[in-house]
Amino acid sequence: MKLKGQHNFKATPAILWEKLMDPDTLARVTPGVSRLERKGDDQFEAIADVKLGPVKGSFTGELSVLEKKEPESFTLNIQQKSKIGNVSADVHIHLKPLSDEETEMSFDGKAKLSGLLARTGQRVLSGVANTLTKQFFSAMEEEVGNNPT
């Protein structure tokens, strides 16, 4: 499943970077994530409760921050397991300054699903991915003190 999105924030890349590198903030703004626990440098145990269309499950696994180029880009590697299936994803996040006070955040990646998740159907999962993306950007807006645009 392809993951892609972008949003403009009234914040500098440095401010967004700081928020994204903080595990507490990342847990707050990422839909479904209830907890991120540091396991090492840039490695976390992630606990999430996600509802994907008719399918609902609790996921546990690892989240790693890779290929960091502060404050421009990084890659999130996600490995999650649950009773309803597994998710493996690599998502590249890019922060591009548009002006002194505005930054475009974009992401591009792929997720591989197995089990019941994979059988749920691409159309349902694409809709869920779009909803989760909007929730993430809205929560990030709140974190940086902006009103959603």
Image (tube, rainbow, N blue to C red):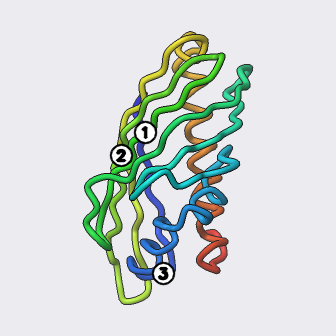
Query: Is 121 rendered above or below residue 29?
Result: above
Would you place residue 28 above or below residue 44 in this image? below
Pointer 1: residues within 10 angstroms few (<14), some, or many (20+)? some
Given contact means CB atoms under 8 Å apart, are the residues at marks 2 and 1 in contact? yes
- The relative height of residue 86 versus residue 3 in the rendered view (above or below) is above
Q: Real-space Cα distance between discs 2 and 3?
A: 21 Å
Secondary structure found at label 1: strand
Quadrant for residue 111, please give it. Answer: top left
> Farthest residue toward the front?
40
- Name the spot of residue 97 as percent of width and height, x first: 33, 77
Which SS class for mark 2? strand
Residue occupying image coordinates x 56% and y 15%: 121
Q: Is residue 4 left or right of residue 10?
A: left
Type of amino acid under label 3: Ala
> Which residue is rendered at x = 34% and y = 78% of the image?
98
Q: Nearer the viewer, residue 140 or 28?
A: 28
Q: Identify residue type, mark 1.
A: Leu
Q: Is residue 68 above or below residue 101?
A: above
Question: Residue at label 1?
Answer: 3
Q: Which mark is residue 142?
A: none
Q: Earlier in the sequence, mark 2 or mark 1?
A: 1
Instruction: Indicate which disc, 1 or 3, sits on the residue closer to the N terminus.
Output: 1
Taking the spot 41% from the left edge, 64% from the top edge, the residue there is 105
- Please name the residue that numbered disc 3 is placed on: 11
Q: Quadrant of the N terminus?
A: top left
How far is disc 2 from disc 1 in space, using C-alphas? 6 Å
Residue holding disc 2: 108
Q: Tell me the amino acid under the disc marked 2.
A: Asp
Name the spot of residue 58 as percent of width and height, x first.
70, 30
